[in-house]
Protein backbone atom coordinates (compact mmCIF):
# COMPACT_ATOMS: atom_id res chain seq x y z
CA UNK A 1 0.00 0.00 0.00
CA UNK A 2 1.35 3.43 -0.95
CA UNK A 3 1.83 6.05 1.71
CA UNK A 4 0.46 9.54 1.26
CA UNK A 5 2.96 12.18 0.42
CA UNK A 6 2.91 15.60 2.09
CA UNK A 7 1.05 17.21 -0.82
CA UNK A 8 -1.79 14.69 -0.70
CA UNK A 9 -2.06 15.08 3.05
CA UNK A 10 -2.20 18.89 2.79
CA UNK A 11 -4.75 18.68 -0.03
CA UNK A 12 -6.95 16.41 2.08
CA UNK A 13 -6.83 18.78 5.06
CA UNK A 14 -7.63 21.75 2.81
CA UNK A 15 -10.54 19.91 1.22
CA UNK A 16 -11.98 19.03 4.62
CA UNK A 17 -11.67 22.58 5.90
CA UNK A 18 -13.18 23.98 2.71
CA UNK A 19 -16.13 21.59 3.04
CA UNK A 20 -16.66 22.66 6.66
CA UNK A 21 -16.45 26.32 5.66
CA UNK A 22 -19.08 25.78 2.95
CA UNK A 23 -21.34 23.98 5.42
CA UNK A 24 -21.02 26.86 7.88
CA UNK A 25 -21.84 29.42 5.17
CA UNK A 26 -24.91 27.41 4.20
CA UNK A 27 -26.01 27.13 7.83
CA UNK A 28 -25.46 30.87 8.36
CA UNK A 29 -27.61 31.69 5.32
CA UNK A 30 -30.33 29.31 6.51
CA UNK A 31 -30.42 30.80 9.99
CA UNK A 32 -30.12 34.35 8.66
CA UNK A 33 -33.14 33.83 6.42
CA UNK A 34 -35.30 32.27 9.12
CA UNK A 35 -34.18 34.94 11.61
CA UNK A 36 -35.28 37.66 9.20
CA UNK A 37 -38.67 35.95 8.86
CA UNK A 38 -38.88 35.81 12.66
CA UNK A 39 -37.94 39.47 13.09
CA UNK A 40 -39.91 40.93 10.19
CA UNK A 41 -42.84 38.53 10.07
CA UNK A 42 -46.40 39.57 10.79
CA UNK A 43 -46.57 37.83 14.18
CA UNK A 44 -47.72 40.10 16.97
CA UNK A 45 -47.45 37.57 19.77
CA UNK A 46 -45.82 38.90 22.90
CA UNK A 47 -43.82 36.21 24.61
CA UNK A 48 -41.15 36.12 27.24
CA UNK A 49 -37.99 34.27 26.32
CA UNK A 50 -37.43 31.61 29.00
CA UNK A 51 -34.52 32.39 31.31
CA UNK A 52 -33.06 28.94 30.62
CA UNK A 53 -32.15 30.18 27.13
CA UNK A 54 -29.74 32.65 28.76
CA UNK A 55 -28.27 29.90 30.93
CA UNK A 56 -27.79 27.89 27.73
CA UNK A 57 -25.50 30.63 26.49
CA UNK A 58 -23.25 30.15 29.51
CA UNK A 59 -23.25 26.39 28.93
CA UNK A 60 -22.16 26.84 25.30
CA UNK A 61 -19.44 29.28 26.30
CA UNK A 62 -18.14 26.86 28.94
CA UNK A 63 -18.14 23.94 26.50
CA UNK A 64 -16.38 26.10 23.88
CA UNK A 65 -13.69 27.00 26.41
CA UNK A 66 -13.18 23.33 27.29
CA UNK A 67 -13.06 22.28 23.64
CA UNK A 68 -10.66 25.09 22.80
CA UNK A 69 -8.37 24.18 25.70
CA UNK A 70 -8.54 20.54 24.60
CA UNK A 71 -7.49 21.57 21.10
CA UNK A 72 -4.61 23.67 22.44
CA UNK A 73 -3.39 20.80 24.62
CA UNK A 74 -3.77 18.37 21.74
CA UNK A 75 -3.40 14.65 22.03
CA UNK A 76 -1.55 14.73 25.33
CA UNK A 77 -4.05 16.48 27.59
CA UNK A 78 -6.96 17.25 25.30
CA UNK A 79 -8.89 14.06 25.93
CA UNK A 80 -9.53 15.03 29.54
CA UNK A 81 -11.13 18.31 28.46
CA UNK A 82 -13.19 17.09 25.52
CA UNK A 83 -15.35 14.69 27.53
CA UNK A 84 -16.71 17.32 29.98
CA UNK A 85 -17.31 19.65 27.03
CA UNK A 86 -19.40 16.97 25.36
CA UNK A 87 -21.43 16.43 28.54
CA UNK A 88 -22.03 20.17 28.89
CA UNK A 89 -23.22 20.22 25.26
CA UNK A 90 -25.67 17.44 26.10
CA UNK A 91 -26.81 19.44 29.14
CA UNK A 92 -27.47 22.35 26.76
CA UNK A 93 -29.79 20.13 24.72
CA UNK A 94 -31.74 19.01 27.79
CA UNK A 95 -32.08 22.57 29.02
CA UNK A 96 -33.25 23.57 25.53
CA UNK A 97 -36.04 21.01 25.76
CA UNK A 98 -36.91 22.45 29.19
CA UNK A 99 -37.05 25.92 27.59
CA UNK A 100 -39.54 24.62 25.03
CA UNK A 101 -41.57 23.14 27.89
CA UNK A 102 -41.59 26.55 29.62
CA UNK A 103 -42.80 28.20 26.42
CA UNK A 104 -45.53 25.58 26.15
CA UNK A 105 -46.65 26.20 29.75
CA UNK A 106 -46.91 29.93 28.93
CA UNK A 107 -49.43 28.97 26.25
CA UNK A 108 -47.03 29.10 23.32
CA UNK A 109 -47.14 25.67 21.72
CA UNK A 110 -45.51 24.78 18.43
CA UNK A 111 -48.84 24.85 16.61
CA UNK A 112 -51.56 27.45 16.85
CA UNK A 113 -49.59 30.15 18.65
CA UNK A 114 -48.74 32.30 15.65
CA UNK A 115 -45.92 32.74 13.18
CA UNK A 116 -43.41 34.36 15.51
CA UNK A 117 -43.66 31.49 17.99
CA UNK A 118 -43.42 28.93 15.18
CA UNK A 119 -40.24 30.59 13.88
CA UNK A 120 -38.80 30.60 17.40
CA UNK A 121 -39.31 26.84 17.65
CA UNK A 122 -37.86 26.34 14.17
CA UNK A 123 -34.77 28.45 14.95
CA UNK A 124 -34.04 26.84 18.29
CA UNK A 125 -34.91 23.36 16.97
CA UNK A 126 -32.60 23.71 13.97
CA UNK A 127 -29.85 24.95 16.26
CA UNK A 128 -30.37 21.92 18.50
CA UNK A 129 -30.09 19.61 15.47
CA UNK A 130 -26.83 21.25 14.43
CA UNK A 131 -25.60 21.00 18.01
CA UNK A 132 -26.28 17.25 17.97
CA UNK A 133 -24.23 17.05 14.76
CA UNK A 134 -21.45 19.03 16.45
CA UNK A 135 -21.51 16.69 19.46
CA UNK A 136 -21.35 13.62 17.24
CA UNK A 137 -18.44 15.18 15.34
CA UNK A 138 -16.65 16.02 18.60
CA UNK A 139 -17.23 12.52 20.03
CA UNK A 140 -15.90 10.98 16.80
CA UNK A 141 -12.83 13.22 16.93
CA UNK A 142 -12.31 12.38 20.61
CA UNK A 143 -12.37 8.67 19.81
CA UNK A 144 -9.88 9.11 16.96
CA UNK A 145 -7.66 11.39 19.03
CA UNK A 146 -6.34 8.40 20.95
CA UNK A 147 -5.15 6.68 17.79
CA UNK A 148 -4.67 9.10 14.92
CA UNK A 149 -3.70 12.47 16.31
CA UNK A 150 -5.43 15.82 16.24
CA UNK A 151 -6.05 16.21 12.51
CA UNK A 152 -9.82 16.86 12.81
CA UNK A 153 -9.93 18.44 16.25
CA UNK A 154 -9.33 21.96 14.94
CA UNK A 155 -12.30 21.68 12.57
CA UNK A 156 -14.57 20.25 15.27
CA UNK A 157 -13.66 23.04 17.68
CA UNK A 158 -14.12 25.68 14.98
CA UNK A 159 -17.58 24.30 14.15
CA UNK A 160 -18.50 24.31 17.84
CA UNK A 161 -17.40 27.95 18.20
CA UNK A 162 -19.52 28.75 15.13
CA UNK A 163 -22.56 27.15 16.80
CA UNK A 164 -21.90 29.22 19.94
CA UNK A 165 -21.76 32.46 17.98
CA UNK A 166 -24.88 31.41 16.09
CA UNK A 167 -26.71 30.81 19.39
CA UNK A 168 -25.76 34.26 20.69
CA UNK A 169 -27.08 35.78 17.44
CA UNK A 170 -30.35 33.83 17.80
CA UNK A 171 -30.71 34.81 21.44
CA UNK A 172 -30.25 38.50 20.62
CA UNK A 173 -32.75 38.21 17.75
CA UNK A 174 -35.27 36.49 20.01
CA UNK A 175 -34.74 38.93 22.88
CA UNK A 176 -35.05 42.07 20.76
CA UNK A 177 -38.12 40.80 18.92
CA UNK A 178 -40.05 38.94 21.63
Image (spheres, rainbow, N blue to C red):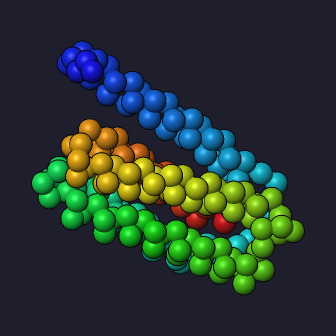
Q: Quadrant of residue 106?
A: bottom right
- Taking the view exactly as shown, the residue that stands out farthest to the bottom is 105
Q: Is residue 49 something one can see in this rendering?
A: yes
Q: Nearer the viewer, residue 148 or 79?
A: 148
Q: Is residue 70 above or below residue 55?
A: above
Q: Is residue 100 above or below residue 10?
A: below
Residue visible at 27% across and 21% down in the picture: 1
What is the tally of numbered marks visible in this picture? Answer: 0
Q: x, y percentage for residue 150?
A: 23, 43
Q: Is residue 2 left or right of residue 140?
A: left
Residue visible at 63% across and 41% down in the picture: 30
Residue visible at 62% across and 54% down in the picture: 126
Residue visible at 32% across and 19% down in the picture: 11
Q: Nearer the viewer, residue 93 or 41?
A: 93
- Taking the view exactly as shown, the residue that stands out farthest to the right is 112
- Taking the view exactly as shown, the residue that stands out farthest to the left is 76
Q: Nearer the viewer, residue 155 or 103?
A: 155
Q: Is residue 154 left or right of residue 92?
A: left
Q: Is residue 14 above or below residue 172?
A: above
Q: Is residue 32 something one can see in this rendering?
A: no
Q: Nearer the viewer, residue 17 or 170?
A: 17
Q: Is residue 13 above or below residue 70?
A: above
Q: x, y percentage for residue 152?
A: 31, 41
Q: Is residue 154 left or right of residue 95?
A: left
Q: x, y percentage for residue 89?
A: 42, 65
- The quadrant of the image that shows the C terminus is bottom right
Q: x, y percentage for residue 37?
A: 72, 48
Q: Is residue 150 left or right of residue 118?
A: left
Amino acid sequence: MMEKNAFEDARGKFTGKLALFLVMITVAILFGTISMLYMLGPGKESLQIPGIFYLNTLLLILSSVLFHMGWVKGEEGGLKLLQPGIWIGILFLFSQVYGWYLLYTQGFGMVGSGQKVAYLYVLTGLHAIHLVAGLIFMAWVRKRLKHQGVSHLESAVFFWHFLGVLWVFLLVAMWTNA
